[in-house]
Image (cartoon, helix red, strand yellow):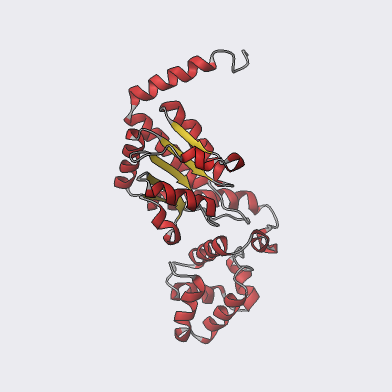
């Protein structure tokens, strides 16, 4: 989708007087209203909630919630962390627990709706048949990359997590060859180091399977397969419940597609763990 401010500018002449008031306020206070409820937002401009809903529909959204989600996505891509942390990111009362869970559920449901079955089958096949699988994620994304690496290495050999400790990443990827696969996690704000690594790998013929946000136009050139995920959060950082759910699916699908191989690798792993890794309780 185009930049939110650009959409407002394109449609501004068609707005009613009340809608122009909303558009003017949004242009100057986009960060402030990203986490407002419909009632709070309408109160700031002194218009009815119905007027706000009609405004959002005039922009092409199904309603206020859909418009707010897109505003949040714009903020996640373009502003710094201190700018994302506004008074509106704090909740009064007891709604935050429920809203946080509902937000993650929404992200998972929307991410599921975005997936293409044929694309997922191709990803499973490519990961299963690749001689080596490299896994990449920087900063917050490293947590999901590590999770994928730990689970995938239990069911197949030659899984390599790119850790870039001490800037060692050239040596970590220099052996990658055509036919190998890289599973990458890259979300706004995009890591420059991640794009550098992905560019080099892609030029070497390594297939890139990229987990990224649903608005992926800026990074589509770095991947062969894109798995879009909703990552909208109530707070100042992305939430990774949806890409984690999709990661769990891939691990389960790869295990099922390669049952005997997965079982054999698990047996080898378990034989090592039995040497005294766990407490004997």
Q: Residue 24: horizontal and vertical position, in percent?
A: 58, 81
60 vs 191: above or below: below
Asked whether 194 or 23 is in front, the reply is: 194
Q: Please identify the quarter of the rendering in which residue 246 is found.
A: top left
Asked whether 275 or 64 is in front, the reply is: 275
133 vs 100, left or right, is: left
Q: Residue 191: horizontal and vertical position, in percent?
A: 54, 53
| Quadrant of the snapshot with the N terminus | bottom left
275 vs 269, left or right, is: right
Asked whether 239 or 162 is in front, the reply is: 162
Q: Residue 240: horizontal and vertical position, in percent?
A: 53, 47
Q: Can residue 215 be seen in this view?
A: no
Q: Residue at x 35, y 35 (%)?
A: 130
180 vs 219: above or below: above
Question: Which residue reaches farthest left?
Answer: 118
Q: Which residue is drawn at 53% across and 74% down?
A: 52
| Quadrant of the snapshot with the C terminus | top right
Q: Please identify the quarter of the rendering in which residue 89 is found.
A: bottom right
Asked whether 267 or 130 is in front, the reply is: 130
Q: Which residue is drawn at 33% across and 28% down?
A: 258
């Amino acid at each position: 989708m185009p930049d939110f401010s650009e959409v407002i500018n394109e449609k501004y002449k068609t707005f009613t007087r009340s809608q122009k008031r909303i558009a003017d306020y949004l242009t100057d206070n986009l960060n402030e209203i990203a986490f407002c409820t419909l009632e709070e937002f309408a109160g700031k401009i002194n218009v009815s909630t119905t007027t706000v809903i009609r405004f959002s529909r005039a922009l092409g959204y199904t309603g206020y919630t859909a418009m707010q989600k897109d505003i949040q996505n714009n903020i996640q891509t373009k502003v710094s962390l201190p700018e994302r942390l506004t008074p509106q990111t704090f909740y009064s009362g007891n709604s935050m627990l429920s809203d946080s869970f509902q937000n993650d559920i929404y992200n998972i449901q929307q991410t599921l709706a975005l997936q293409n079955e044929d694309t997922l089958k191709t990803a499973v096949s490519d990961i299963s048949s690749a001689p080596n699988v490299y896994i990449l994620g920087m900063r917050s994304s490293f947590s999901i990359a590590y999770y994928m690496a730990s689970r995938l290495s239990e069911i197949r050999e030659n899984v390599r997590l790119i850790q870039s400790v001490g800037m060692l990443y050239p040596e970590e990827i220099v052996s990658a060859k055509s036919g190998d696969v890289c599973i990458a996690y890259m979300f706004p704000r995009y890591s420059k180091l991640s794009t550098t690594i992905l560019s080099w790998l892609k030029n070497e013929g390594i297939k890139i399977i990229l987990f990224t946000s649903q608005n992926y136009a800026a990074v589509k050139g770095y991947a062969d397969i894109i798995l879009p995920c909703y990552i909208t959060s109530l707070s100042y950082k992305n939430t990774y419940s949806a890409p984690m759910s999709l990661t769990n699916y891939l691990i389960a699908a790869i295990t099922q597609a390669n049952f005997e191989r997965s079982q054999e690798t698990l047996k080898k792993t378990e034989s090592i763990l039995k040497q005294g890794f766990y407490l004997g309780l």
